[in-house]
Amino acid sequence: MNITAILSFLESLAPLVYQESYDNCGLLTGSSARECTGVMVTLDTTDAVVMEAVLRKCNLVVTHHPIIFGGLKKISADNYVGKAVIAAIKNDIAIYAIHTNLDNVIGGVNGKMAGLLGLINQKVMNPVPAGLKKLFVFVPDTHLEKVRDAVFRAGAGHIGNYSEAGFITEGTGSFKAGKGAHPFVGEEDRRHYEKESRLETIFPAFLETSIVAAMISAHPYEEVAYDILDLANRDPSLGSGLIGDLPEEMDEKAFLTLVRETFRVSVIRHTRFRNRPIRKCALCGGAGSFLIPKALAGGADVFLTADLKYHEFFDAGDQLLIADLGHFESEQYTIDLLYDILREKYPNFAVQKTTVNTNPVHYFFQA
């Protein structure tokens, strides 16, 4: 199996078009055409992670944080980025980043966090315009199922947790084949009437080429009549942050204890306790201060995130408990998420987790 197949699978779950504009997801070093000898998953890519991949015979590193984020003016061993890139190039290691595109799908980083905390009724906190389109195609009744199956297999018809969503309107179509045409039904230069159905279904814009190709391949007509419309709908499964409910309400200290034990953290920075129970929890792995207004609007009792600045703790007033557990700490289980995803898809293939702790932040305590 080559690296391309693995990357295509990952992108079917978290398409690159879902990354934020500032991000740099995708293949950062190496060739995707090579045979894959093994995959190592990590949160960050350092030269130590790359050398571990070499020792464990993995020529593909799947990382959450891109090692190349901004523009590189030089590649030298003066910093950790240069060291990692040089090590990857020397040892022919492909590095693939799956960052904010994995943040922005409901089953991604935030979904993993929510699952660990046992949240139910999970929803994306800040749904974004998803680049959705709608397909209308007119199909003779004899080929309706064939065309419908083809567009669904190509990725159309997904709405939240539902698939193969579509609508059929029955009617009668008419056409007249011109000279030189080769009609599936009817005769040249005579108007023909045919029992047809109008199939309509929704799809993500980035799949348009493959969906149209699948539709045309399955359709019997020489000239296929179809329309594609842009939609303003927001995809409820796509966007930043997540909000959900605890199975049972907890007091604030008990909740923070649950967070501390679940994420194995020694320190949680938080706003003052409001002495109110916690039931609805909003969260965002990594830096999520931009979502404080969304957490408030969603009626959350607590917002769990990282990288909060001093003045951002004021933003919730007394309406919300804000807790900062650290960037690495909030996203550390992304390694398990990626590992489980790849192992389920490729149960007989070498997928490994890094043993390198890449957290650059340490804490000093004195009893």
Image (tube, rainbow, N blue to C red):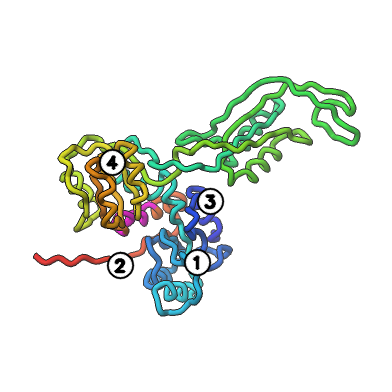
Residue beneath label 2, please?
Answer: 360
Q: Look at the picture and state if 36 lies above or below 216.
A: below
Label 2: how many Cα within 10 Å (few below 14, some 14–19, many 20+): few
Residue beneath label 3, please?
Answer: 17
Question: Earlier along the polypeptide chain: callout 3 or callout 1?
Answer: 3
Q: Image check: 190 left or right of 18?
A: right
Residue beneath label 1, please?
Answer: 94
Q: Secondary structure at mark 1?
A: strand
Seen at 20% across and 57% down, the residue is 267
- Asked if marks 2 and 1 touch (Cβ < 8 Å), the reply is no
Q: What is the CA distance from the residue labelled 4 to the residue labelled 1?
A: 38 Å
Question: Earlier along the polypeptide chain: callout 2 or callout 3?
Answer: 3
Question: Earlier along the polypeptide chain: callout 4 or callout 1?
Answer: 1
Amino acid under disc 2: Pro
Magenta residues, as a range?
328-337
Q: In the figure, residue 310 lies in which quadrant?
A: bottom left
Residue beneath label 4, please?
Answer: 281
Nearer to the camera, 87 or 35: 87
Of marks 2 and 1, the one in the foreground: 2
Q: What is the CA distance from the residue labelled 4 to the residue labelled 2?
A: 28 Å
Label 4: how many Cα within 10 Å (few below 14, some 14–19, many 20+): many
Q: From the image, which quarter does the C terminus lie in?
A: bottom left
- Spot occupied by residue 182 in the image (x, y as percentages of width and height): 85, 34
Nearer to the camera, 59 or 42: 42
- Asked if marks 3 and 4 touch (Cβ < 8 Å), the reply is no
Q: What is the CA distance from the residue labelled 3 to the residue labelled 4?
A: 28 Å
Main SS category, magenta section: helix
